[in-house]
Structure formats: structure tokens, C-alpha cells
Image (cartoon, rainbow, N blue to C red):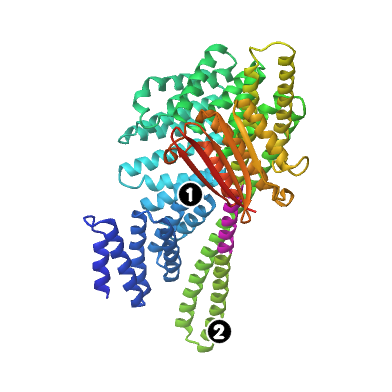
């Protein structure tokens, strides 16, 4: 059997075979290894299978088998297999930005490396531990791990991988020193990282990053002239880094402009032009993070001249993107800027939100530090217990060999067994704590998913509701531009009143988006008013047919909101894209199902080619939210019918 397993493992490593065949050989070798009931052979086969799951990008099985290898290697005390499995898991969770899980596995890997071992794998594990702790702002631990990584790398032969790791480590130490306010040390580390970048093949991008980071330190030191000099030295090199990182040039332009603003000695129009250039490129690249960073900087520029509309525009844009991307530092900056331009209740709201967010982030940082400390403490405890146990075993052997006293030896054995049970209990307890911790991570993922769904719902409410009504009111006001007299004045007053109503709706939207139809007039009256207003604004003939068989008071509020928004979105789509003259809307009850039909006599469209529009996506999203079904039937030059069924 062992020969068959080795043959299959070698076949799985044959790069002339397809990935599917290689994976099949690896699975076969593992199946045979299970039958041998030899854990060492099984571990060997499963390590190879783990590699094949990675190559075939089957990450679920990759994680599962590495967890099994992790446990089995620990039982066999196979330090090599254990460090590989733990590092694989640490690397995977680091890629997913689950830093606590990544830190846990890398920390456990480190305890199985011999103290005097000098290897690239050990140096890499230390570097990643440093990177994780820097991200979580545990700077002392990060600095210690980065320095240990450099010390190991310096003892290894020169390779491109080693040079890249040395660049990473020195750049990381530069970031840590900068965050701790040790600016001279930060500059020293960035200069060293730049030297390694020059020795890396295709290391030009590393060089410009080091220079950019160094300029940032000079900004924090208040040496704006030196910072601008470094930033501007990167501008002529645009053609060299543009292809690899197209966002770098606009980021440099933004940094130059913001540094000039911070210095207090600048020409407003010149700085504004630079910001606008960076903002325009960011929008063309459709890079949200770059747009967010430039927008918050522009808002600070306009704050210098107290131009409130522009401040609000850019700060709000940065704030919205920061929420979507969890960029909490930019979110804090935006809230602070917004709080300072309004003295009324809105300004107080932004200030309270800023304080709340700051406190929340401090609590999160504190919990993360405590969590990492617990992981490290648990790991150290197990290490010390193992060391104590080994030492006691040695004394046991020495005493038993020297004295040959059976009763005393028996006493020692009983004592040792008790300690082994205690240690096993501690290990089992640690494993149980890990499982509980993983469940907590899973629960956090569900909370994050719920938050994302809530953001999506709010976006749809704004797009389908308030923006639709604003669009219709604007069209109506536009149609009165060429009208005069008392009738025109009366109509304008009506639409201005409508704008005031929309303003109140915007103010209320953050409080409760689900109260649209809880009270007030009947739902069909509300829908009729919507159809009448929008078709009048869009200059469409309309008919609305509905049944009285539906008891709308018993229909869930969420269903009514979505029906209302679907009709509103559909009318807006008909006006924008269909070139229609008339629209027919019907709401009926058939077989205990609410049937909504919206038909127009417009140009029609190819249903298969038009599914990516935000209008159709929103309609489908709303229908799915109430467990309904939507069909789009359209014939070119004849019109379109939207048929929606919703459980009653």
C-alpha cells in the first residue's frame, strides 16, 4: 500500500498532467492511506492533497483538510507538518482579512519552530505576525516580530524572495515608527527599504512607494517643503508606474495639493486645480477608495473659504464611501468636517455621531488587543506546560535509574499521569474555546451581512422614492419655464410645496423607512395619487384598474412599500427609455396572489440585453424581498409589460 500511495503522490505532482487528474491522484492516495490506519502515512498524503486543493482553488476543502492536518500533526508531534498546516491556515485567514484567526494560527506555528531554526518559512511567519499586529495597532508586538524576521532573513542566501521580504519588513517598521511618532527612525527605515527595492528585479514600484511613504513622514513633521519636493520627484516617473498602479499618479497629485493646503502658504486656484485633476482621474478609474480620499481633502480646502455647499458635497461623498468600505478613519474625518459647517441640529447630530464612532472604534481596538493577548497567553501557557512536562520526565528517568526504588517510581508515574490528564484537559479546553471563538466569528459575519443588506435597502429607498419624486417635480417646474400668469404662479406654488414635502421625507428617511403606509389614507389612494402625479409630470396617458378584494390593512407594510416603489420605478423607466404615450396599471387578486401589471406602448427593448440596468435590478430586488416573481415581456416598437405576482 505504501508504494501505491507514493506512486499516486508522485503522479499528482506531475505538471504534465491536467489539474483535474492530479487532484484525482491525490484523493486516491489519501483514500488508500486511510485504510493503512497509519497516521503518519495519512498525514503525508493529506499534506499533498492540501496542495492540490490550493492549486485547483477549492478553498473550502483546502481549509478543511489543513484543519485536519493541524490536529493530526499536533497529536503526532510532527513539528514540520504542524507548522505547514498552521501557516497555511494563517495565510488563508490573512487573505480574508480575518486578522484574529490568522494571528492565532501563525502564533501556534511559531511555537513549533525550533528556537535556533533559520528558515524562510519562519521568517515569513514572523513578518506576517508583524503585519497583522500593525494593522490592529499593536505596535510593540509588531515591531518585535518584524525585527526578528529581519534577523532571520539576514542569515539566508540572497534571493528575490528574500529581498522582497526585507523590503516589506523595513517598510513595515517605517509605518510602525511613524505611527509611534518616531519620525527620524521612520525615515531611516524607509531609506533602507528603498535600498532593497533597488536590488529587486522589477522593484521600481517598491521604490516609488518608499519615497511616497517617506514624504508622508515629512508632512507629519511639518516639513512641507521637503514633502512636496519628494512628491514632485515622482511626477516625471508616471509612465513607469502607470501601468502597474494607475491610481498612484492621482494619489500623488492629491498629496501635493493637500500638503500645500496644510502648509497654509498656497494659491487657492492652483491647489483646487490639482484636486480637481486627481478627482477627475479617480472618477475615470472608478476607484472608490481614491475618490473617497480626494473628496475628503477637497472638502477641507473648501472649508478654508467656508464654501458650505462644496464642503457638504465632498464630505458627504467621502462619508458614504467610507461607510460602504469600512474606512473608519475617513468616516471620522468626514463627520468632523460636516459637524463644523452647521450650527443647527444637523451639526450637533454629526458631532454626536463622530463621538459615538470614535468611542466605538476605541472599544473595538481595546477588545482586539485583549483578544490577541489572550491568544498569546494561551500559546505561551501550553509551551511552558510542555517544557515543564519534558523536564519532569527527564528527572523521572534520572531518579528511577539512580535509585531503582519501585515504590518511589510508582509514585512518580502516578503523579505524572495526573499532570498529563490536567494538561490534556487544558488542551481540550483550549480547543473548545477555539470552537466557541469560531462560532463568534461566524455570528459576526451574519451581523455584517445584515448591515450590508440594510445599506442596500436604504440605497433602493433613496433611488426609487425620493429621487423619483424630485425628478418628476423638476420636470413639472421645467414645463412652467415658458408659462406666465396666475395659473403658472399657482402651479409653481404647488410644486414648491411638493419640494417642501420631499425635504421633510429626506429628513425622516434616517428615522424610519418602513412607516410610509402605516397610517393615513388608504393604500390605493396613495398609489392613485402617485400614478396621477407622475404621469402628469411625464405627459403620459394613464389608466389604473384595481380590485377592492384586497384588504390592504392585513398586507405587510414591507410589501406595500415595495409595490409602491416598483410602480414608481417603472413609470420613471418608461419616461426615460420607452418614448411611450400611454401606460396601463392593474392590481388584481387571483388565487390568493396579488397580481401587478404595468404595460406601456413604447419602443420596447431586448429583455436579455437589459438586465444590468439599476432600475430592473431594483425591481427584481424588491420582488425577491417579498418572495414574489417578476416577468418582463417586451416587443420592439410595440411596448413592454411588467408582470409581478406577490403572495397575499
Question: Which range of residues does the magenta coloring cover?
Answer: 433-450
Q: Position of residue 361 (x, y in %)?
A: 64, 42
Q: Is residue 341 above or below residue 518?
A: above
Q: In the image as oriented, which residue stretches furthest toward the bottom?
A: 406
Measuring from the top left, give residue 212's x and y in whole percent.
Answer: 45, 28
Q: In percent of the image, x 74 and y 19: which residue is there?
A: 493
Picture quadrant of residue 439: bottom right
Quadrant holding the C terminus: bottom right
Q: Is residue 24 above or below residue 632?
A: below
Q: Which image quadrant for residue 64?
A: bottom left
Q: For the stretch drawn in magenta, what is the main secondary structure?
A: helix
Q: Is residue 239 above or below residue 265?
A: below
Q: Which mark is residue 411?
A: 2
How many marks the image carries: the answer is: 2
Q: Residues within 10 Å of mark 2 (few under 14, many from 20)?
A: few
Q: Is residue 522 magenta?
A: no
In the image, 213 versus 338, the foreground residue is 338
Residue under label 1: 96
Amino acid at each position: 500500500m505504501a508504494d501505491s500511495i507514493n506512486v499516486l503522490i508522485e503522479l499528482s505532482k506531475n505538471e504534465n498532467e491536467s489539474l483535474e487528474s492530479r487532484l484525482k491522484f491525490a484523493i486516491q492516495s489519501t483514500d488508500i492511506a486511510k485504510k493503512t490506519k497509519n497516521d503518519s502515512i495519512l498525514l503525508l498524503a493529506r499534506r499533498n492533497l492540501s496542495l492540490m486543493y490550493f492549486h485547483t482553488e477549492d478553498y473550502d476543502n483546502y481549509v478543511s483538510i489543513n484543519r485536519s492536518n493541524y490536529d493530526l500533526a499536533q497529536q503526532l508531534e510532527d513539528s514540520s507538518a504542524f507548522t505547514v498546516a498552521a501557516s497555511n491556515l494563517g495565510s488563508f485567514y490573512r487573505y480574508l482579512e480575518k486578522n484574529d484567526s490568522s494571528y492565532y494560527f501563525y502564533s501556534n506555528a511559531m511555537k513549533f519552530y525550533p528556537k535556533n531554526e533559520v528558515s524562510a518559512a519562519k521568517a515569513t511567519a514572523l513578518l506576517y505576525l508583524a503585519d497583522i499586529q500593525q494593522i490592529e495597532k499593536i505596535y510593540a508586538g509588531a515591531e518585535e516580530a518584524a525585527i526578528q524576521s529581519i534577523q532571520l532573513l539576514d542569515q539566508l542566501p540572497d534571493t528575490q524572495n528574500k529581498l522582497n521580504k526585507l523590503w516589506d519588513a523595513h517598510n513595515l517598521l517605517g509605518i510602525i515608527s511613524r505611527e509611534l511618532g518616531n519620525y527620524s527612525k521612520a525615515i531611516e527605515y524607509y531609506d533602507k527599504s528603498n535600498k532593497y527595492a533597488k536590488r529587486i528585479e522589477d522593484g521600481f514600484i517598491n521604490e516609488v512607494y518608499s519615497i511616497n511613504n517617506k514624504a508622508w513622514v515629512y508632512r507629519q513633521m511639518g516639513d512641507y517643503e521637503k514633502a512636496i519636493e519628494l512628491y514632485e520627484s515622482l511626477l516625471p516617473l508616471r509612465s513607469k508606474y502607470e501601468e502597474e498602479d494607475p491610481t498612484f499618479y492621482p494619489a500623488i497629485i492629491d498629496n501635493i495639493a493637500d500638503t500645500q493646503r496644510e502648509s497654509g502658504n498656497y494659491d487657492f486656484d492652483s491647489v483646487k486645480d490639482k484636486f480637481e485633476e486627481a478627482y477627475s482621474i479617480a472618477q475615470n478609474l472608478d476607484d472608490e477608495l481614491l475618490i473617497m480620499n480626494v473628496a475628503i481633502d477637497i472638502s477641507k480646502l473648501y472649508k478654508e473659504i467656508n464654501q458650505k455647499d462644496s464642503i457638504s458635497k465632498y464630505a458627504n461623498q467621502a462619508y458614504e464611501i467610507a461607510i460602504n468600505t469600512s474606512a473608519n478613519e475617513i468616516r471620522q474625518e468626514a463627520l468632523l468636517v460636516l459637524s463644523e459647517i452647521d450650527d443647527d441640529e444637523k451639526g450637533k447630530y454629526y458631532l454626536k455621531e463622530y463621538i459615538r464612532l470614535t468611542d466605538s472604534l476605541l472599544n473595538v481596538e481595546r477588545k482586539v488587543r485583549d483578544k490577541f493577548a489572550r491568544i498569546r497567553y494561551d500559546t505561551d501557557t501550553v509551551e511552558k506546560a510542555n517544557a515543564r512536562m519534558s523536564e519532569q520526565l527527564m528527572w523521572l528517568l534520572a531518579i528511577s535509574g539512580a535509585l531503582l526504588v519501585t515504590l518511589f517510581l510508582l509514585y512518580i508515574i502516578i503523579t505524572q499521569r495526573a499532570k498529563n490528564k490536567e494538561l490534556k484537559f487544558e488542551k481540550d479546553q483550549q480547543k473548545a474555546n477555539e470552537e466557541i471563538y469560531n462560532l463568534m466569528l461566524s455570528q459576526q459575519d451574519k451581523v455584517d451581512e445584515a448591515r450590508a443588506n440594510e445599506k442596500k435597502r436604504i440605497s433602493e429607498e433613496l433611488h426609487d422614492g425620493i429621487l423619483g419624486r424630485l425628478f418628476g417635480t423638476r420636470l413639472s417646474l421645467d414645463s412652467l419655464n415658458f408659462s406666465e400668469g396666475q395659473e403658472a404662479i399657482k402651479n409653481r406654488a404647488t410644486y414648491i410645496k411638493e419640494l417642501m414635502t420631499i425635504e421633510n421625507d429626506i429628513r425622516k428617511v434616517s428615522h424610519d423607512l418602513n412607516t410610509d403606509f402605516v397610517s393615513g389614507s388608504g393604500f390605493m389612494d396613495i398609489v392613485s395619487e402617485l400614478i396621477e402625479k407622475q404621469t402628469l409630470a411625464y405627459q403620459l396617458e394613464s389608466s389604473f384598474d384595481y380590485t377592492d378584494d384586497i384588504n390592504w390593512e392585513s398586507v405587510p407594510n414591507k410589501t406595500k412599500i415595495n409595490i409602491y416603489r416598483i410602480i414608481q420605478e417603472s413609470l420613471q423607466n418608461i419616461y426615460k427609455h420607452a418614448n411611450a404615450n400611454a401606460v396601463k396599471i392593474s392590481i388584481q387578486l387571483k388565487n390568493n396572489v396579488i397580481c401587478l401589471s404595468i404595460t406601456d406602448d413604447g419602443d420596447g427593448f431586448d429583455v436579455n440585453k437589459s438586465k444590468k440596468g439599476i432600475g430592473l435590478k431594483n425591481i427584481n430586488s424588491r420582488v425577491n424581498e417579498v418572495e414574489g416573481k417578476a416577468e418582463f415581456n417586451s416587443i420592439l416598437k410595440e411596448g413592454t409589460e411588467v408582470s409581478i405576482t406577490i403572495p397575499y
